[in-house]
Image (tube, rainbow, N blue to C red):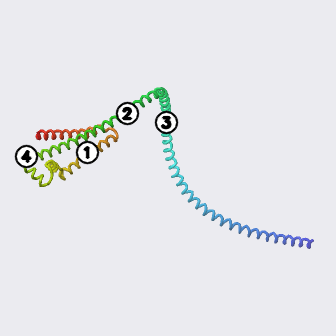
Amino acid sequence: MKRHLIEDLKSRLKANQENEKTSNETLESLERKVKALAEDCLNKKTSIDSLKQRLNVATKEKSQYEQMYHKAKDELEKKDLKLTNLESKMIETECAMTELETAASQQLHGLAKQSEQALETVQKKLLLTNDKVEEFMAFVKALTRELQHSVQELRTKIKQAKKTGEVRACKKGLSQESVQLAASILNVSTTDLEEILEVEDDEETAKTKMEFEKDKEWLQYIQKLLEAQFPFASYLMDAILEKLNEKKKLVEEYSSLMKHTV
């Protein structure tokens, strides 16, 4: 029995030793896990502190964003109110426009029946007006040409009257014998001598050329007025009156010369 007891104790000791070994290994494993967990807790604590700081920043930002949100919300509500008012006004305007369109459509429908006759009448009047305008243009052009031609004829008559007066004055200052002597010296007849005395000098030629250019410019100005847009009646009247006044002065000058010549 002692031997069995000793063997039993040995076997128990051996089992306990094995259990102790297993417990030691388990303990070492647990210590390693505890150490790892401690390091992990430290890291998590650091992370939690960082998250707390970020949470504080986020809280402040949230507060700012909430203020901005409420402000934007208030502005949006105001704009929504304005938009609602505008929509109401637009609806009222659309209703008013619909009524106006209906009324206009009815009026246009009524006027459409009269438009064809009215258009034909207007076209006839327009054609008649165009004919009258063309006739008026032709009249003005003929009048201005005739007036300019009349002024040129008066200028020519005045020049001839002046030359005739100068030749007569020259003849009065010279005896018939002197005239015949001058003609014989030049080997021309007395009639040819009179024509020589009547030849225009350079100054008179330049004056004639300048008068011709002025008449040309005047006719071009009249044509430009006729081609211009309305109104041009006052300018046309001024231009024609200017030429009529010039003709009046020429007539007076010619009448005076003819009286003195007579």
Amino acid type of the residue tagged 4 in the rendering: Lys
Q: Nearer the viewer, mark 1 or mark 3?
A: 1
- Residue under numbered circle 1: 215
SS of the residue under disc 2: helix
Mark positioned earlier in the residue sequence (4 or 2) = 2
Q: Is residue 95 left or right of residue 168?
A: right
Amino acid type of the residue tagged 3 in the rendering: Met
Distance between mark 1 and mark 3 Cα atoms: 67 Å
- Residue under numbered circle 3: 90
- Residue under numbered circle 4: 172
Q: Residue at x 50, y 50 (%)?
A: 68
Q: Nearer the viewer, mark 4 or mark 1?
A: 4
Mark positioned earlier in the residue sequence (1 or 3) = 3
Direction right: furthest residue: 1
Which one is in front, 98 or 204? 204
Query: x, y (%) of residue 100?
Result: 47, 30
Query: x, y (%) of residue 139?
Result: 31, 36
Which one is in front, 22 or 163? 163
Look at the image and tell me whether residue 235 can be seen.
no
SS of the residue under disc 4: helix
Locate the C terminus by quadrant. Answer: top left
